[in-house]
Image (cartoon, grey):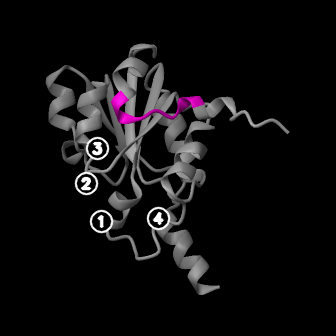
């Protein structure tokens, strides 16, 4: 077996390298973010739908510390940042993956200047972080309805009951 990392890992980029990497992606660029702690069908369906809104999909992932501050539970995240990013990068619909340590992804949105900003259906469009900024530069913002009602929180609750 080779020590060479799988090709998909090249999709993971540090925030400081975003400008260079984003410049290589075809536009329109779609941006989304989240914890993606335990990847499930709801996540992958949502990500495929997001990608369909443009030519490239940028995913910004909450750091472990950022997830902890969201108050999702003392045992969250279940999977460390590096693992969560690797799983996302392995998806065909995802073009690039980075992270953020802040409470919101606003700085990554400003770094990327996406044409399309997307969140899941539990977010009213006007409440999506980056809404004002993206619409100010004539981009569009979407809240995609959930097709598969799944959540990491529900999965964790189920596991705890076992």
How far apart, in angstroms, are the residues tagged by discs 1 and 4?
A: 10 Å
Range covered by the magenta-colored residues: 10-16
In x, y percent, where is residue 3?
75, 37
Which residue ends up furthest to the right in the rendered image? 1
Task: Decide which of tag 1 and tag 2 comes sooner along the chain.
Answer: 1
- 1 and 4 marks in contact (CB < 8 Å): no
How far apart, in angstroms, are the residues tagged by discs 1 and 2?
A: 7 Å
Task: Decide which of tag 4 and tag 3 comes sooner along the chain.
Answer: 4
Q: Nearer the viewer, residue 122 or 78?
A: 78
Residue 6 seen: yes
Residue pointed to by mark 4: 77
Q: What element carries label 1?
A: helix
> Which residue sits at x=38%, y=27%?
17
How far apart, in angstroms, are the residues tagged by discs 3 and 1?
A: 14 Å
Mark 4 burial class by Cα count in 10 Å: few <14, some 14-19, many 20+: many
Residue pointed to by mark 2: 103
> Which residue sits at x=65%, y=85%?
162
Task: Decide which of tag 1 and tag 4 comes sooner along the chain.
Answer: 1
How far apart, in angstroms, are the residues tagged by discs 2 and 3?
A: 7 Å
Quick one: quadrant of the N terminus? top right
Which residue ends up furthest to the bottom in the rendered image? 161
Q: Residue 69 carries which label?
A: 1
Q: In this view, does 35 lie to the left or right of 114?
A: right
Q: Which mark is residue 105?
A: 3
> Which residue sits at x=31%, y=22%?
115
Task: Decide which of tag 4 and tag 2 comes sooner along the chain.
Answer: 4
């Amino acid at each position: 077996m080779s020590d060479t990392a799988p090709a998909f890992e090249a999709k993971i980029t540090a925030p400081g390298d975003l400008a260079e990497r984003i410049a290589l992606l075809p536009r329109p660029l779609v941006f989304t973010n989240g914890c993606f702690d335990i990847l499930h069908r709801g996540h992958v369906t949502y990500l495929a739908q997001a990608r369909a809104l443009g030519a490239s999909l940028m995913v910004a992932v909450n750091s472990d510390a950022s997830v902890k501050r969201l108050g999702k539970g003392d045992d969250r995240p279940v999977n460390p940042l590096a693992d969560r990013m690797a799983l996302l990068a392995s998806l065909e619909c995802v073009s690039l993956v980075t992270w953020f340590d802040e409470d919101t992804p606003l700085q990554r949105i400003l770094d990327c200047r996406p044409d399309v900003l997307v969140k899941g259906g539990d977010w009213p469009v006007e409440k999506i972080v980056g809404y004002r900024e993206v619409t100010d530069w004539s981009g569009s913002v979407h809240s995609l309805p959930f097709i598969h009602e799944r959540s990491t929180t529900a999965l964790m609750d189920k596991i705890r009951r076992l």
